[in-house]
Amino acid sequence: MSSYRDQQKYIDALKKYEKKFTPKEAEDYKMFVKRQKDDEDFDTISMKRLAELYTKYNQPVDKSKYDHFFKKNTDKKSE
């Protein structure tokens, strides 16, 4: 089973992507929020669906594309 903390983390993270959801995903998300407010633990199928939405919309930022903004220190200090 899932923990309440995981459910809350997924729901909070998905809140900012709510406008990007398809109608079916939006309906599922609203159901998850209602069930969360009622303090229900999600069953494995619901938790799997919530995790799928989370992985679909919450993509980590590729930080390597910012490397060109920062100059690497290649000079060696002689002491």
Image (cartoon, helix red, strand yellow):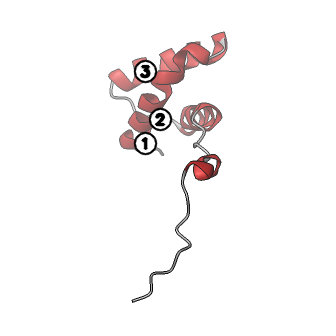
Report, in whole angstroms, how far the alpha carbon at label 1 lies from the one at label 3.
Answer: 13 Å
N-term mark: 1 or 3: 1
N-term mark: 3 or 2: 2
At label 1, the amino acid type is Asp
User: Would you say the residues marked 3 and 2 are in contact, meaning their CB atoms lie under 8 Å apart?
Assistant: no
Task: Looking at the picture, tell me which residue is in the foreground, 10 or 1.
Answer: 10
Instruction: From the viewer's perspective, tell me whether residue 26 is left or right of residue 1.
Output: right
User: Would you say the residues marked 1 and 3 are in contact, meaning their CB atoms lie under 8 Å apart?
Assistant: no
Residue depicted at x 66% and y 14%: 22
Give SS at disc 2: helix
Task: Looking at the picture, tell me which residue is in the foreground, 21 or 4.
Answer: 21
Q: Which mark is residue 10?
A: 2
The image position of residue 3, as x and y in percent, is 40, 44
At label 2, the amino acid type is Tyr
Q: Residues within 10 Å of mark 1 (few under 14, many from 20)?
A: few
Q: Which mark is residue 63?
A: none
At label 3, the amino acid type is Val
Q: Which mark is residue 6?
A: 1
Outermost residue to the front: 78
Look at the picture and state if 33 lies above or below 2: above
Instruction: From the viewer's perspective, tell me whether residue 3 is left or right of residue 69.
Output: left
Report, in whole angstroms, how far the alpha carbon at label 1 lies from the one at label 2.
Answer: 6 Å
User: Would you say the residues marked 1 and 2 are in contact, meaning their CB atoms lie under 8 Å apart?
Assistant: yes
Residue depicted at x 56% and y 32%: 50
Look at the picture and state if 65 lies above or below 74: above
Per the image, the residue denoted by label 3 is 33
Task: Looking at the picture, tell me which residue is in the foreground, 40 or 53.
Answer: 53
Give SS at disc 1: helix
The image position of residue 30, as x and y in percent, is 49, 15
Q: Residues within 10 Å of mark 3 (few under 14, many from 20)?
A: some
Instruction: From the viewer's perspective, tell me whether residue 67 is left or right of residue 77.
Output: right
